[in-house]
Structures are given as C-alpha cells and as structure tokens.
Amino acid sequence: MAYLELQNVSKLFGAVAAVKDFNLAVEKGAFVSLLGPSGCGKTTTLRMIAGFEMPDAGALTLDGMDITSVPPNKRGTGMVFQAYALFPNMNVRDNVAFGLEVTGHPKQEIDERVREMLALVRLDDTAKRFPHQLSGGQQQRIALARALAIRPRVLLLDEPLSALDAVVRVALRGEIRRIQLELGITTVYVTHDQEEALSISDRVVVMNQGLIEQTGSPEEIYRQPQTRFVAAFIGTANQLNGVVVDRTQVRFGEILLRAPVPSGLNESSKAVVLVRPESIAIHAAAPTDAHNVLEGTIQTITFLGPITRVGVDVGGTRVVADMAASNRAAFTHTQHVWLSFPPDACQVMANQ
Amino acid sequence: MKQRPLVLQSLLVALFVAYMILPIIATYIFSIATKWDITLMPEGYTLEWYQTAFDHPYFSITLTNSFIVSIAAVLVGLLFIVPTTYWVHTRVPSAKPLLDLLMILPFGIPAVVLALALIRVYAFPPFARSPFLLISACVIFSMPFMYRPVSNSLMAIDVHTLTESALSLGANTLQILLRVIAPNILPGILSGSLLVFATVFAEFTLANLITGASFKTFPILLVEFTRRDGRIAAALSVISFTVAWLASIAILWGSGRGRKPTEEALGAR
Ligand SMILES: Nc1ncnc2c1ncn2[C@@H]1O[C@H](COP(=O)(O)OP(=O)(O)OP(=O)(O)O)[C@@H](O)[C@H]1O
Ligand SMILES: [Mg+2]
C-alpha cells in the first residue's frame, strides 16, 4: 500500500462534480503534481487531502491509517497557499513557531526548529520581521518553513508560485524541489503551469473536469500522451486529423503519413497524428530523402530566445515547427516551405 | 466642475465645527458659572456645582453602577458577538445577510418598547427589574455597535485562509480565535468596545424603566439634577464627557500597544 492513497474519491458541489472517482497512490518521499486547466478540481482534491473538504464518496489513507474523517488539525499535513496566508500580527519567528506552540512543544525545541527551518529556506536573518516587510517570494518561503516546522507527514502546495513574477517563480520552484529532496518529504503540488509540473515532479497527474486523464513521469506525460487532451495541454503538439490506411500509414488529406499505428486502431478508422514542433524540420526547398513531407505557407514567425517558432498553413491546418534561432534569416512571412518529420516522432491515437 | 470658492468652503467647515463644539463649550462654561442668564458671558466663576455633585450621596454609587453596566455590556458583547460573527463569516457565510438584518433591528425598536417588553417577559426573579436584565437589555441595544466594526474588520482580512492555515498547523478553534483572528481584527474589536461603552454609559431610557430607583445609573442622576439645577447637571455632563474621553484614550492606548511590535521591527531595519 502506498503512503498516501485516495480511493474512488468524489466531491460534489451542488450538482457540479468537482472531483469524480479519483484514484491516486503517492509513494513515501515522492513529489506528485496535480496539473490541469482552471476548474478541473485540483484545489478540491488537495483540500480533501488536507481535510478542509469532506469527500462525498471514497476513502483517504495516510501511512496505513484511514484519515477520511480525521479533522484537518489532527492530520499532520503542512499546507502552503497561493496567497501566502502568513499571520500578519506575528513576526517571522512566531509564524514559523505557531504550529509547534499550539501543540505544546517545549520552548527550547521550538527555538531550535525555527532556526533550522529558517536556515532551510535561507532566510536566517528575517526572524524579527513582519510579513508585510518581506517580498512575495520571501513570504512564500516563510510559509513553506512554517508548514515544514511541524514535520508534516505530507506537504501540500496549492499554486504556491502563481502570485510571483517569472524570475522568482523559476528560482523558487527549484528551491522547493531542493528542500523536498533534502527532507525526503512526501509532497502533493497543485499547478496549472505544465512547465512547472514537468520540471519539478517525480510524477504528474493530468486532470480534466474532475477526472484523471493520465498519470506518469514527466517524460511519459510529455512523450506518450494517452489522450488528445493531454497531448494538447502538455506542450503544443500538432494534431493532424486523418484516416488509418494500414499499420504504418495514416492518410492526412492527400498525403500518406508514415507513423506507427497502435493495434487498437482499425483500418479506415479516424485517427489523429501527434507531432511535437521540435521534431519537425523546415526546408526552403523540397527535401528529397525525407519521410512525411508537408507543403505550406509561413503565417507567423515568433522569436522565443533559443528557438524560433514558425507557424505554417498546410492546406488549412496550422502546423507549428521549431528551428534554431540562427536559421531565422533564411525564412520570411508568406514564403512557401516544406516540413518533414520522422515516423518515430509521431504518435497516433483514435480521433473520438 | 467649478471648485467652490475657498472662503465659502472654510465658512461651511467653521459653521459645522461651531455647530458641533459650541454646545459642549457652553456646557463646560455653564458648569463653572455663578450666574449666566442675561449676560453674554457668565457673571462669575465657581467650582461649587462640582462640589455639590461630588458630595451628593448618589454620585459615586451611580457612577459605579454605570461603569458596571457599561463594562459588563462590553464584555458580554465581546464574548458573544465576536465569536458569533467569526463563526458566521467562516462556517455559514450564507447566513450573513440574515445576521446583518438582525443587527439593524435594535435601531428600529424604540428603547421604551424594548424595556417594557423585557420587563413583562422577565417578570420573575432573579431577572425582574434586576441589573442583570438591564445589562442584557443594554447588550441587545448596543449589539450593532459591536457587530459592525468587527464584521468589517473580518471582511478586511482573509479570515478563511488564515483559519485554514492555522488549522493545518494543528491549532484548535479557541487558539485560532485568540491567537490569529482576534489580534488581526483588534481595531474593529476596540472601536466596537468603545462605541458600546459610550452608548451604554449614556443610556437613560432602559435604565430608568428597568431598574429605576433600585439601581440608579449616572444618566438617571443627571436627569434628576436637570430638574433641580441646570448648572449641577452641566457639571455632571462634563464628568460624563470626561469618562467617555478617558475610556477612548485608554482604548486607543491599548491599541497603540498592540501595534508596537511592528514599529519596533520597522525601527530595527
Ligand atoms: N466551495 C465551492 N462551492 C461550489 N463550487 C465549488 C466550490 N469549490 C470549487 N467549486 C467548483 O468545483 C470545481 C473545481 O474547483 P477547483 O477549485 O478544485 O478547481 P482548480 O482546478 O483548483 O481550478 P483553478 O486552477 O482555477 O484553481 C469548479 O467547477 C468550481 O467552480
Ligand atoms: Mg485551484
């Protein structure tokens, strides 16, 4: 049995099912992210783990114990909120000490733990400051120290970085992962930012409308999306709608694409071929030795730093391809170009 | 839009200030006047009226009684209204409009009606015409003054998230209320207490009807003196003002102490 388990958990708000028949097993020490668009039920799931919401069906177990009806202040879960939620009337020291003080730990132990936690989040010298005297990033690190000070069995974070600006966000997510690994603490992290989820998690749970679409390692989620939703939500996969011809070919308009067709798909059934922009090469002249060649006209050229993303209109379908920024000069708007990609870069799935 | 001429503006302000302050100044002067009827200013000055007031056997009794009733009303208000307001804000937010409405009722019911109704319903001991009944009536009467500032302060902070973060750290409801919520709504609690204290301290109708002669309050004494000698009544009014001001200063001083750690931390930076 896994350390933290959610079994067939459901939560209704009136007639709206926020979370439906949710199953999740988190191993001890793992970092799991719940990823999905707004309103898909991530926060609700996290709040059920924390005990702030009661599931309408299903059970939760933590460390072999059924916690479904344990009140939130007896669960030993540390929670970090998007809005920091530091106590404004207390200084940093008292904020971090709060969880230990209300549970009656001796003062000496508390002082020691506070020092340890502030060192962990690298804010040793802020003990006497008040929350309003700290930057957003610092406040969130104190919130993390406060949640960790009680030595929780699970650390829960609900979009802890979304109120911060981009640079701080990236730096702090690395910090969170470093601390999580250092303490080996089981962590459930909620975000709607796929890059964030992929970069710091051991496992990612992609959710949509209260249901789990796919669970897997970041690589699996990125390279082998199991549903069209995951493919579309993670990265910007191109989706070419076609019809299965045989086990190695899919017809896309007038063109036969070479791609591995999974056994579940029958001949002449509708299929979608997924190709990532970074797998597509772009040519100024028709390539002679390439598979899967598409012709089209450049619509957009977007500079993205290390790469340049080119949007091409292929007979009405928009296909995006990435190229090294150094090749930028060779292409202009409305230029006629050829795209190619290897068969093994394609993933074929049923088009429901 | 054309701005009002500065002269007119200052004149309006001056008129308003005069309207508010003149009666108070007049009361102060009247309380130390020997004779002030046909002259512009009093004919002479004396502290005799204060002496008479202080010497009156009921002076300290009524002052004490008024303090007892006012402080009790503040404490009962704090004990019941603050937790109730917090509870409605966090657990049953849908009941908030109802509570808002209930808290306007005391304004709509004349004190006479409230007093007579309470006297009839609680006609049995130990309530009948007792100070307990008076305190209860004052609590009801002054409820909105405690509720509004507390409710507004609760809306100004993120009660929900603060409560939840304290919960996840293992705190129980009492600890959350005392250590997290109360300190953060302290300004509301203080101004609520101040308003309740001042309202109840000056309350006449309820005290006169419910306890009357058996438990006289300061305003009752004041009204009695009005019938005898306006100058002594003026002296008592001045004492009443002074009590209200001292209470405000005490409360503001208390809130200043509550804010002090912040300033210290700022100074240390
Ligand atoms: N207290 C509530 N009362 C009624 N409906 C709610 C409540 N909380 C959430 N919902 C609904 O449940 C669904 C899931 O909400 P949830 O907050 O879990 O989404 P989320 O994935 O966290 O979204 P976001 O990324 O916007 O935070 C939404 O449709 C939401 O409107
Ligand atoms: Mg959310």
Image (tube, coloured by chain):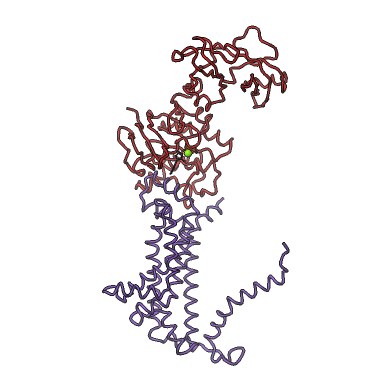
Query: In terms of depth relative to the viewer, which is nearer, A57 or B126?
Result: A57
Of B18 and B209, the residue lying toward us = B209
Q: Quadrant of residue B108?
A: bottom left
The picture places residue B117, in percent across and down from the top left corner, at 35, 73
| Colour purple maps to chain | B
Q: Is residue B61 above or below residue A5?
A: below
Which image quadrant for residue A319? Answer: top right
> Where residue A347 sits in the image (x, y, percent)?
51, 17
Taking B100 as reference, is A310 above or below it? above
Residue drawn at x 50%, y 55% as measured from the top left? B261
Say left or right for A62 vs B44.
left
- The one nearer the camera, B78 or A240, is A240
For the question of whether residue A119 can be seen, the reply is no
Residue that protrudes farthest toward the front in the picture:
A268
- Between B109 and B25, the one nearer to me in the picture: B109
Q: Is residue A346 above or below residue B181?
A: above
Q: Tell me what hue chain A is rendered in.
A: red
Q: Quadrant of the N terminus of chain A?
A: top left
Looking at the image, is B193 positioned above or below residue B269?
A: below
Q: Residue A171: where, in percent of width, then height?
A: 55, 34
